């Protein structure tokens, strides 16, 4: 019997659900944490989450096709807010510091240019705080830098058809 990739519970029917950018096969209880991925365009259900028995047939067909679910149903899946978000670079603090030093500005000078406090610039360069969207735009404009990452290797890792199937149940220790 297939297992839910989030909680590890055995279930006769699993639903392909996108949770924080990852497509997982989830039981009905865990499917509420994400957005259902539509694999068939002939679905007549108009609700966000499928409660009909068609979910069991779609999950069994997706499991029998192996890694081809991302290629076959990619255009019909439901979009969520994470598809359009750009990620902040992991080394944003280094990028800011090097760009500021490259322009010969002190932290106080940069803060004055941005109309922000110097303590904020110090915290950003130490990596203590993440810049707000507004401060990020100001920094990118003033220092002529980009603090966002494009499609990373991590995204490619999720979409590739890996031969090993590790589930969250393999990693998480349950407290029963």
Image: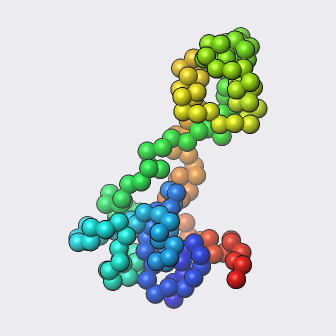
Q: At 57% from the left edge and 17% from the top edge, which residue is drawn? A: 142
Residue 165 visible, this orientation:
no
How many marks the image carries: the answer is 0
Rendered position, 7 above or below 69: below
Above or below for 169 versus 87:
below
Which residue is pictured at 67% across the width and 28% down the height? Answer: 95
- Residue 14 spot, x, y in % from top left: 45, 78
Which percent across, then down, holds residue 45? Answer: 26, 71
> What residue is rendered at 50% in x and 65% in y?
33
Image quarter of the C terminus: bottom right
In x, y percent, where is residue 49? 37, 70
Q: How is the image coloured?
A: rainbow
Q: Is residue 174 above or below residue 136?
A: below
123 sits to left or right of 39: right
117 vs 9, nearest the viewer: 117
- Taking the image as shown, residue 103 lies to the left or right of residue 71, namely right
Location of residue 55 (image quadrant): bottom left
**Residue 131 visible in this rendered orientation of the protein:** yes
Percent x, y of residue 53: 33, 83
**Residue sitting at x 66%, y 75%:** 170
The image quadrant of residue 80 is bottom left
């Amino acid at each position: 019997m297939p297992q839910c990739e989030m909680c590890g519970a055995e279930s006769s029917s699993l639903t392909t659900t996108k949770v924080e950018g990852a497509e997982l096969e989830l039981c009905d209880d865990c499917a509420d944490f994400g957005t259902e991925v539509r694999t068939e365009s002939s679905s007549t259900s108009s609700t966000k989450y499928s409660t009909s028995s068609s979910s069991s047939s779609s999950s069994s067909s997706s499991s029998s096709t192996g890694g081809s679910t991302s290629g076959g149903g990619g255009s019909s899946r439901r979009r969520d807010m994470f598809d359009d978000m750009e990620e902040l670079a992991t080394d944003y603090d280094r990028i800011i510091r090097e760009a500021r030093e490259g322009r010969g500005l002190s932290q106080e000078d940069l803060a004055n240019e941005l109309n922000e406090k110097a303590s904020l610039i110090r915290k950003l360069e130490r990596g203590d705080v993440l810049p707000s969207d507004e401060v990020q735009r100001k920094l990118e404009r003033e220092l002529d830098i980009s603090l966002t990452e494009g499609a990373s290797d991590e995204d490619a890792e999720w979409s590739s058809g890996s031969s090993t199937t590790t589930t969250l149940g393999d990693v998480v220790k349950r407290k029963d």
